[in-house]
Image (tube, rainbow, N blue to C red):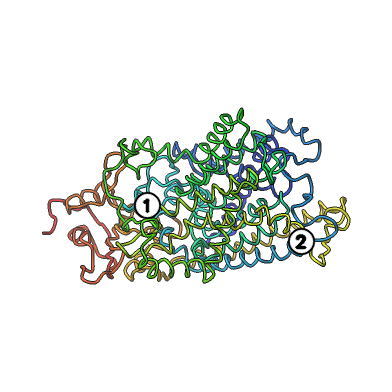
Amino acid sequence: MLDAGRYLLGVGEVGLLAGFAWLGATAIRRRLVPDFTGALSILATLILALALLVWVAELLGSFSLLKPVPFLLVVGIVGIGLWALLRGRRQAEGGRERTQLGPPAGPPPTGDGTRGRGVRGSTLVALAIAAVAVVHFADGVRLRLDTGMTGFDSTWYHGPFAAGFFQSGDTWSLHFIAPQFLAWFYPANAELFHAIGMNAFDRDLLSPLLNLGWLLACLLACWCIGRPHGVAPWSLALGAVALSVPALSDQAGEARNDIVGVFFLLAAVAVVVNATSRDSGDGPGGGNWRPAPGAVAVAGLAAGLAVGTKLNFALPCAALVVGLALIAPPPRRRGTLLLGTSAALLGGGYWYLRNLLHSGNPLPWFDSVGPIGLPGPEQALGGRDAHSVLGYLLDSKVWSDWFLPGLHDGLWAIWPLLVGLGLAGLLLNLGRHAGPSARVAAAAGLAAALAWLVAPTSASGPEGMPRGFESGLRYLAPALVLGLVLLPLAPFLRDRLAGLRSSSRLVAPWTTKGEFGGAARGPAWGAAAAVALLTVTVAAGYVVQRDYLRDRYASPTFTTPGLNAAFRWATPISGARIATTGTRQYPLFGTDLSNRVEFVGEERPHGGFAAASTCAAWRRLLDEGDYDYVVASRDRVEAGRPHYPATARWTEGPGATVVLREPPTVVFRLDGRLDPSACPD
């Protein structure tokens, strides 16, 4: 565990980073979208603050400088500098922001359901449903605080990428891991936030908690989507339900990034819906779109951050950016497209530029565009056999054996209702009676569904046995969430829902005499409550981190017996260089994340990477890597196959001492160099 001083130092660093980023983002938001107020202003500021952290991390990481002190200094300089530079323009707000692109200042006339002296019953119900979703998610986080992150993708690439950024400070180089799916080319915005947390504490204390924060941000975006039409509670409630489906349960307490991409997509849609809801005649008959360029920039930035998080968001975000241009007045279409595209590239283009310069191709998974060949690694993707849902769409046996059970387990027994309502939300908002912003949002949702339908991993597995279908439903989640959140905006529903009133209202203390019961005591009351909450959170965090670091991977049971034993062995190891052949690598980094863990393989042209295929090559790579330990293992125990991989036999001999042996894993301590010419037969 961390002592109190080191823990508080990490808390202080996180607080300063958040404060500086929020300060700079507030200045930019007031410049770009000065009329966004309330929840919408918070959402826009959050998008910009996250972008500032990503940009600084990418800038420093390009020069291997993503370290605690440089990162804090640059974020501080940028945040304070932006505030000082742009504060002179705040008079445009006139002392109080008035909505031009969204609801008016204060509670919207139709939107939040909190005006007057009470709170609508629909708002209370929506908040209750959202609270249940948060508690359900938090329970999953609690489980991971007892064990460490155990999800396959978390231990395969999310965790190793973040730990690699943390150890090396380098984001530009390719971080080679197990040679499956060319995963080292994946965009990594989400992993940057894990690395930032690791920088603060020298541990992964924040990693199991981050997705809970992303869930809360998703709920904020859901509220904002319904806000301009007076249906915020309905959008929030339906979004909370969609975000709680079992297909997304593996996001809780893990480093998976699906929920991160969902947030940025929802945030982009929220900006679009609010920015076009009034001046465009956004209602029956539509109208021309005339928002400020700042709204285009913020929406495009959020879309780009989604694409910089996960590849499957490229199609829906492209649909959103192009849709913005199409609904703009003809003279503005080219400028809108250029601005939206540029902002999107700023949000996610870094990783694709890196891929281009390393492999000659921003998307190395694709070796051609029609008849045009593209450069890239000449190697198979590896992993499971690639199949899409589209390829099995008319296969009745696959439907009965795999798809229907998968939908039942991944989307609950009520999946026909959820899918039907989600699809209705997209199609109804695509109709001619919907406004232009709703049509753009619906098009993005349908594009997300199409991306899932054609994705080669949406039904991965042996021919006729799409074992990856249920897990792949998380690629459908963006479309499902967006469809349900947009459903209350459907033309024939929104007026009815906005007009509903509860027979009774709960009188809230802050609605009786101004905000928080009075202008004079309001700020003091709010500040005192915030300080008390922060104090309790920090104190509780100290207790939680003690238990978490004690129990993290202390008794792993989530993979094969041999790998579980190896992970338990590695937990107290510190400062070692560990070579491995296992796909799951993250627990080998140790509690303090100081072990340098590498999959042993050979680099190939255009960013390729493959496992060693001969004993001589294997021993040569071990000698070149100057490793202290070798974890030679298979990923699973399979009947009819040898208990241990060939690399275990290749490692045995003088200079290698067995530390642990349990199928399918052998851990060696290397005491000297291994002679490639002395390989066993």
Place of residue 290 in the rendered image (x, y in percent of width and height, measured from the top left): 67, 35
- Taking the image as shown, residue 554 lies to the left or right of residue 446, namely left
Image vertical order of residue 357 relative to residue 115, above or below? above
Residue, far top: 331
Residue that appears at 12% across and 51% down: 677
- Taking the image as shown, residue 323 lies to the left or right of residue 563, namely right
Characterize the local packing of mark 1: few (<14), some (14-19) or many (20 or more) Cα atoms within 10 angstroms: many
Place of residue 460 in the rendered image (x, y in percent of width and height, measured from the top left): 36, 59
Q: What element carries label 2?
A: loop
Work out whether residue 524 or residue 86 is closer to the camera in this orientation and state it: 86
Work out whether residue 29 or residue 587 is closer to the camera in this orientation and state it: 29
Place of residue 76 in the rendered image (x, y in percent of width and height, measured from the top left): 61, 39
Place of residue 210 in the rendered image (x, y in percent of width and height, measured from the top left): 55, 56
Circle nearer the viewer, 1 or 2: 2
Residue that appears at 69% across and 32% down: 86
Q: How many marks?
A: 2
Marks 1/2: CA distance? 59 Å
- Taking the image as shown, residue 244 lies to the left or right of residue 156, namely right
Identify the residue position indicated by label 2 in the image. Answer: 500
User: Quadrant of the image for the C terminus?
Assistant: bottom left
Image vertical order of residue 338 relative to residue 257, above or below? above
Q: What residue type is labelled 2?
A: Leu
Q: Residue 596 carries which label?
A: 1
Characterize the local packing of mark 2: few (<14), some (14-19) or many (20 or more) Cα atoms within 10 angstroms: few
